[in-house]
Amino acid sequence: MSSSERARHWRPAELPGLDLLRARYVAKTFSPHTHDAFVIAAVSRGVEEFRHRGTLERAGAGTVSMINPDTPHTGRAGIPEGWTYHVLYPRPELVARIAADTTTIRGTPSFSATVVIDPRGVRLVTDLHRTAENDDMLATDILLRQTVTYLLTRYGSAEPAPAPPGAGARAAARAREILLARMAAPPALGALAAELDTGPYALLRAFRDAYGLPPHTWLTDARVRRARDLLDHGTSPADAACHAGFTDQPHLNRHFTRIVGVPPGAYQRERRNR
């Protein structure tokens, strides 16, 4: 991270199911990745560009970006000055509870809009960060419910029921299971395809269609997720790197920072300090 950049990624201990990121980035580039939570980002200065569902989105000051869980996206500065934003990462089960209590959405909630100009939404997100930084958890909890309700009411809907999986989707799901089980020593694409009785290019296409990323990129993302879980439970960064399938801690540091936005050591210190 350059000297002009700063970031804090943390979790209020009294609000399980919510992570927060406050950052100013200039040279930062996020690799293609996913989150197992929703992403709600309010830009207060500058412009962020990110690729999402095949479209290059631009989020400038006064906008809110909303990305559903497990949806691949990237991130980088859209202008030389970079961007400043506050981000909420509420878990799906938390968003579902709020939606059931305060909206007419029935079923799994999701956002149908990606980038919207919404000064009120920006104020809600930044006010939530301010109260959380001040350890006012009652106000933070209220603001979280108000923010999620407001954004779902304006831009949310129930997620469509998934179509029955075809043969390609079933092969992709089985490949995903194998990669998760053999994270430290994954098979080559050809060997993986042979194990599933399909061709490598057919498997590559099916995997991309199912998960939005090629297997090797998806695996790096999954390794970072596992490393995060280990760090959350007190595992040292060096041991987390080993258990998550990275060659060493610098290898973990590089990919973790490109996906999470802060180095693993800084990420873990915030959890120990809560």
Image (spheres, helix red, strand yellow):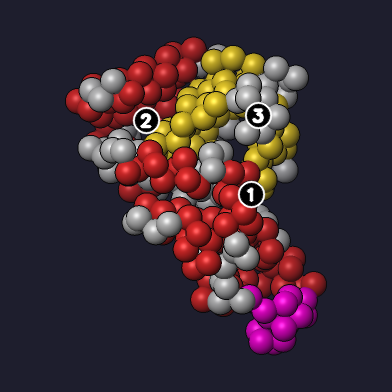
Residue at horizontal 42%, vertical 19%?
126
Instruction: Mark 1: give few (<14), some (14-19) or many (20+) Cα within 10 Å.
Output: few
Q: CA distance from mark 2 to mark 1?
A: 32 Å
Q: CA distance from mark 3 to mark 1?
A: 14 Å
Q: Judging from the image, what secondary structure is the residue with disc 3 in?
A: loop
- Left or right position of 32 against 91: right
Kindly identify which residue carries mark 3. Answer: 2
Residue 177 image point, x, y percent: 53, 74
Residue at horizontal 23%, vertical 23%?
136
Marker count (numbered): 3
* Extreme-right residue of the structure: 201
Instruction: Mark 3: give few (<14), some (14-19) or many (20+) Cα within 10 Å.
Output: few
Please tell me which residue lies in front, 136 or 103. Answer: 136
Q: Judging from the image, what secondary structure is the residue with disc 1 in?
A: helix
- Left or right position of 247 against 99: right
Query: Which segment did they paint magenta?
Result: 186-200
* Extreme-left residue of the structure: 138
Q: Is residue 189 magenta?
A: yes
Q: CA distance from mark 3 to mark 2?
A: 33 Å
Kindly identify which residue carries mark 1. Answer: 254
Mark toward the start of the polypeptide (3 vs 2): 3
Q: Nearer the viewer, mark 2 or mark 1?
A: 1
Q: Is residue 90 magenta?
A: no
Kindly identify which residue carries mark 2. Answer: 148
Residue 109 image point, x, y percent: 41, 43
Residue at horizontal 54%, vertical 43%?
263
Residue type of the residue flagged with mark 1: Arg
Residue type of the residue flagged with mark 2: Val
Please tell me which residue lies in front, 53 or 19. Answer: 19
